[in-house]
Amino acid sequence: MQFDSLTGLPNRASFRASVRCLLDRALTDGREIALLWVDLLNLRREYSIAGDEGADRLVCAVADGLRPWVGAGELICRFGEHCFLLALRRDERTAERLNMIVETASQFGSSGSEGKPEIASGVAFFPEHATTPSELIRFASLAAVSATRSRSRAPILFHSEMDAALQMERDLERDLSAALRDNQLSLVYQPQIDLATGTVIGVEGLTRWNHPTRGPVSPAQFIAVAERSNLIDEIFRHSLHRLLADAARWRSAGLIIPSLAVNASAANVRREDFVAVVMREIEVNPPGYSQLDIEVTESLMMDDEPLFVERLKSLRSIGVKVSLDDFGTRYTSFNALKGLPLSTMKIDRCFVHGVDRSSQAQSLCKTIMTMARYLKLGTVAEGIETVGELQILKQMGCQAGQGFLFQRPVPSERFTEFLLDWPEQKQRSVFADAFTNVDVDPSYDADPLFGLV
């Protein structure tokens, strides 16, 4: 039998040979086997913080937490750099046992200098789900992927729809690769409006995909697929290049927009060359009198704070702003934000919808804006759809907003028309009262939202 040099557990080759024999015996004896796949999610982050030794301690901590649960006639191995497999007898207490295994392994290492293990796990049953070792392992890994995406702390049981979903995802990834090659992706633009004056003070570029046979594909769907491949980097470069090129055309027509915003996913920011990619695009199409604004999600900061801080400081050093997108959806603490060189906090649309009719929504928005004020950050409310929402947000001291009330996301040519028409549009009755007759909270004294740095 061959063993992993770090943990002393059997390695992948040994496990594959042993599990085949185990399944054969189980089939003969009429027994069932539960195959548990355990993924160590924060190994790379621990390596970036504590180096080889810290990462090795984390792996050994999980191995030590799993080992005692394996009895006679059962198997365990370190299957890969960050994953373990356990082949266990299935009985009436299996579900309880699996939960206890994962819970115990998650606690190991939390009292030492190494970080606490963050685990996702999936389980597949022999012969219910698969009758061969390779299929059983694959199905358990699919269930673990589902646990990772749903952030489940408990093991997720495999079901057949997971395999079908994976095939659909593969097809979508293939089509997305072709879409990038054939220039099927486009950028649409939505203005950011100063709620006090009605002035256009920013624009956000949003990536869209019109599939030749499926029609429009939801960004939530294709971005998720792209993030699990290298395609997300191509999408970011494409979007940034398009935004800066279109801004140059608006500038040449005398249309100056102070802030040019584009979204970057966690996968983009984690790449070592992320800042270099941004710099190259700025060199090709300098933003001129405008300032580039990279929008990142709250989840990135929570999942990998040291890397987030490093990238954020690097971006600010080259004159690029960083905004925190969809704020309020991941419960980021004030202490986590304090001292970070952010520029803007974007209030998620789920808090904005119906804010004029809900005292609870108003309290939540007010809390977010109070936090932003103390951190000296600008605020942008997303998803404004009614004049009532606009008025109450302005009254509470929100500085800027975007949403269908002002303009739906539109292609570059139509956005040019919007920029030319907006000075007249904002004088119409639907906007005029909102922009002129609402008293703003006098306590709100944050710095100018889109001032150049």
Image (cartoon, rainbow, N blue to C red):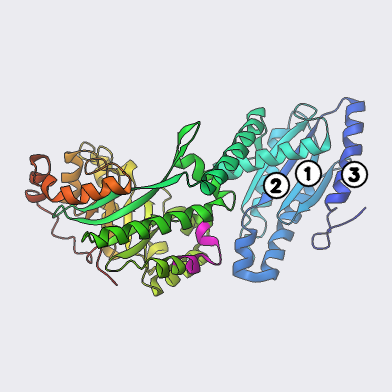
Dot 1 amino acid type = Leu
Does label 1 or label 3 sit earlier along the sequence? 3
Q: Position of residue 241 (x, y in %)?
A: 42, 59
Does label 3 or label 2 sit earlier along the sequence? 3
Between the residue at mark 1 and the residue at mark 2, the CA separation in whole angstroms equals 8 Å
- On screen, residue 153 versus residue 32, left or right, reads left
Frontmost residue, 284 versus 139: 284
Q: Position of residue 336 (x, y in %)?
A: 42, 62
Residue 86: numbered disc: 1
Residue 38: numbered disc: 2
Of the two numbered discs 1 and 3 in the rendering, the one whose residue sits closer to the viewer: 3
Q: Secondary structure at mark 2?
A: strand
| Secondary structure that dominates the magenta span | helix
Frontmost residue, 288 versus 355: 288
Does label 1 or label 2 sit earlier along the sequence? 2
Residue 97 visible? The answer is no
- On screen, residue 385 versus residue 437, left or right, reads right
Q: Secondary structure at mark 1?
A: strand
Q: Are marks 1 and 2 in contact (CB under 8 Å)?
A: yes
The magenta stretch spans which residues? 268-278
Is residue 241 a member of the stretch shown in magenta? no
Between the residue at mark 3 and the residue at mark 2, the CA separation in whole angstroms equals 19 Å
